[in-house]
Amino acid sequence: MTAFGAYDIRGRLGVDLDAGFAARLGRAFVRHLNASCIVVGRDNRPSSPQLAQAIMTAARSEGTEVLDLGLCGTEEMYHATAHFGASGGIMVTASHNPADYNGMKLVGAGAAPLDSLEPIRALMDMAPSGRSAPCRDVAAEARAAWVRTVLGFVDRRALCPLTVLVNAGHGAAGPSFDALAAGLEGTGLRFLRHHHDPDGTFPQGIPNPLLPENRDATARAVRATGADLGVAWDGDFDRCFLFDGTGAFVDGEYVVGLLAEAFLAKEPGATIVHDPRVIWNTRDVVAQAGGRAVASRTGHAFLKRTMRDTGAVYGGEMSAHHYFRDFHCCDSGMIPWLLVAEVMGRTGQSLADLVAARRAAFPSSGEINFRIDDVPAAIARVQAAFDGVPDDLDGLSLDMGDWRFNLRASNTEPLLRLNVEARGDAALVARQMAVLRARICPKG
């Protein structure tokens, strides 16, 4: 069962998972939780309805009531699990993985991450009990409650007239965004929709704006329309990517810093959680604002656990996952752009102006991905070449004083990921990136 990852399930259809796998997972999930009720949602991949139905049928056969969300985003599953007081929730999605993949994201009561998937894996081959329980369609009720919660994060009075271009990438975001936009009428926000309708064949390619080659569609649309802000999402819209009014992509660490500053203005001294890949901008912003910065391992299960343990008001990853204490410590792809629009309204500044000084003070490389046959050997070559202050919280991090890097294996894909940052010297980032690339791939 290679579909089981560090904290999610993902795999190739017909190879790693199918409807039979989904049914066994559904039974194992409800037995592990001794669940009386679970929430199930799905993205718009062609295989997702069948997999979701298999999970729901299996759960009902164990005597567990099922609340069906239908097509939704992962954050809506998180919210509904807590809102309805369910024992747990399952989202059928492969997020930004290729079209021939699918998977499941699992949470317990209160949308809390599971400590481990191993107990569920161990129950996968148990026979069904043959009991029966109902299934309720709660999609409309759940979405309305989610909209109220998300809109509660912003002060409508601070929003000003802005043109916002949104790119759903033909993923699941479109209908959910439309419900949210209806609640923003009268605020002065004007929305332009791009690749908006869900289409599980992904005619424009798999939506993953973290990859540089996937950003151009949104950037061009922002420039062509004269929008003030561009927003793009991945397939299940648990990640939010921002573009300024020039069409320039805003790297995730600067968004984390911007949101951290906004929360610390409201809650002085609060704790902010960040991932260990690109850290200097976030730590500097938090220190200047009088907050407390805490590092966590990369990945939503780890960030959520650290937030719950520390009581953090906000947590952010440079990969565009943003977590909120008052959203059950879960990640949302809709709350971040709303908060940025609020900051733009309060300050009267463009997004480009808001992040310009931070980019200059702490330039970074953006995440570079390598497909490597022998990951441990590549990491060992890099470690042997540099003499810096090490940090092994997540992968290999070395601090050389005026620059640092993080090198780690992906939790969800067969990739080695590299991030480099420096203090005020973009040329240094470029030079060291070239050196690291030669060490990771010595034969080119």
Image (cartoon, rainbow, N blue to C red):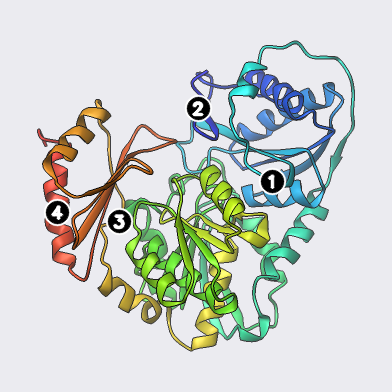
Q: Earlier in the sequence, mark 1 or mark 4?
A: 1
Q: Nearer the viewer, residue 414 or 57?
A: 414
Q: Amino acid at mark 4?
A: Gln
Q: Earlier in the sequence, mark 2 or mark 1?
A: 2
Q: Earlier in the sequence, mark 3 or mark 2?
A: 2
Gap in angstroms between the C-alphas marked 1 and 4: 41 Å
Q: Secondary structure at mark 3?
A: loop
Q: Quarter of the image holding residue 119? A: top right
Q: Which residue is mark 4?
A: 432
Q: Earlier in the sequence, mark 3 or mark 4?
A: 3
Q: Earlier in the sequence, mark 3 or mark 1?
A: 1
User: Residue at left 65%, top 22%?
Assistant: 19
Q: Which residue is mark 1?
A: 111
How far across and down, in percent of the image, does residue 432 sit?
A: 14, 54
How far across and down, in percent of the image, does residue 276 sit?
A: 38, 51
Gap in angstroms between the C-alphas marked 3 and 2: 27 Å
How far across and down, in percent of the image, does residue 132 sit?
A: 90, 23
Q: Quarter of the image holding residue 189? A: bottom right
Relative height, residue 112 to residue 186 (above, below): above
Q: Residues within 10 Å of mark 1 (few under 14, many from 20)?
A: many
Q: Which residue is mark 3?
A: 366
User: CB atoms at circles 3 and 4 under 8 Å apart?
Assistant: no
User: Residue at left 67%, top 63%?
Assistant: 178
Q: Secondary structure at mark 1?
A: helix
